[in-house]
Amino acid sequence: MPRILASGREWQRRACVALYVGGLPEDANGRLQLVGVTACGDADWEIAPYQEPRPCGCRGCRPSRPAPCLLRVNIPVVCQVQAECGQVLRGESVLTTDVALPIRCVQAECWRNQMMVLPCVRLIDGGAPVCADDCRPPVFDCTIELLVEAYMTRWEACGSPAPTCPDLPLFPPPPFG
């Protein structure tokens, strides 16, 4: 069974982002409006340098506890864009956020662990493109809700250990003789 060694969550309830929506058809002209954003595919992640500010104001002090691992997560999203004629088009974009994981082991020993990153995205307020009608790819200033959960797991064997003493009979054996 997988055992969770570390977990982290980044929840941005109202994040204002600029989405560069690519992959729209070339004939998508006129006024465009962003009507939907959905996470799709596997999120790509990398370990980013993390430096926690210290009480003295510098970042070079030796920490009293291990610093969390910082994951930079790139989330592929599918964007639904409505054209002026009412046609709904589909495009792609990428959102980036950071998730802190409090790892209690040395990062060099994490090679046998598995990382699971689960992103969720929803559009709160979609806007019109920021640039003129002819810009490619169109850029939308929008408000989204973003939730990313990250789990570091390791597979461990599970089962009950063998009993330390032999099983006792339910009833005593009948007397001989």
Image (tube, rainbow, N blue to C red):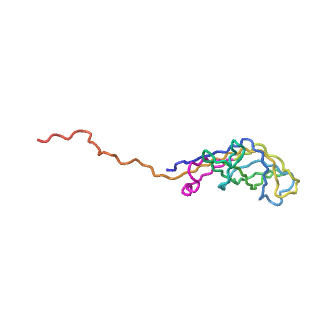
Q: Is residue 29 left or right of residue 161?
A: right
Q: Nearer the viewer, residue 110 or 79?
A: 110
Residue at image point 52% right, 50% down:
2
Residue at image point 66% right, 52% down:
71
Toward the bottom, the furthest residue is 26
Q: Nearer the viewer, residue 6 or 92?
A: 6
- The region drawn magenta spans 100-120
Toward the top, the furthest residue is 171
Quadrant of the image occupied by residue 138: bottom right
Q: Is residue 130 left or right of residue 169?
A: right
How many labels were placed on the picture? 0
Q: Is residue 113 magenta?
A: yes
Q: Residue 23: image x %, image y %?
A: 77, 59
Q: Is residue 88 left or right of residue 102?
A: right
Quadrant of the image occupied by residue 89: bottom right
Q: Nearer the viewer, residue 153 or 133?
A: 153
Q: Is residue 83 left or right of residue 11?
A: right
Q: Residue 50: image x %, image y %?
A: 67, 50
Q: Nearer the viewer, residue 54 or 97?
A: 54
Quadrant of the image occupied by residue 147: top right
Q: Say above or below: 173 vs 108.
A: above
Q: Residue 167: image x %, image y %?
A: 29, 44
Q: Residue 122: image x %, image y %?
A: 71, 45
Please state, as top left, top right, bottom left or bottom right, where the C terminus lies in the image. Answer: top left
Residue at image point 58% right, 50% down:
152
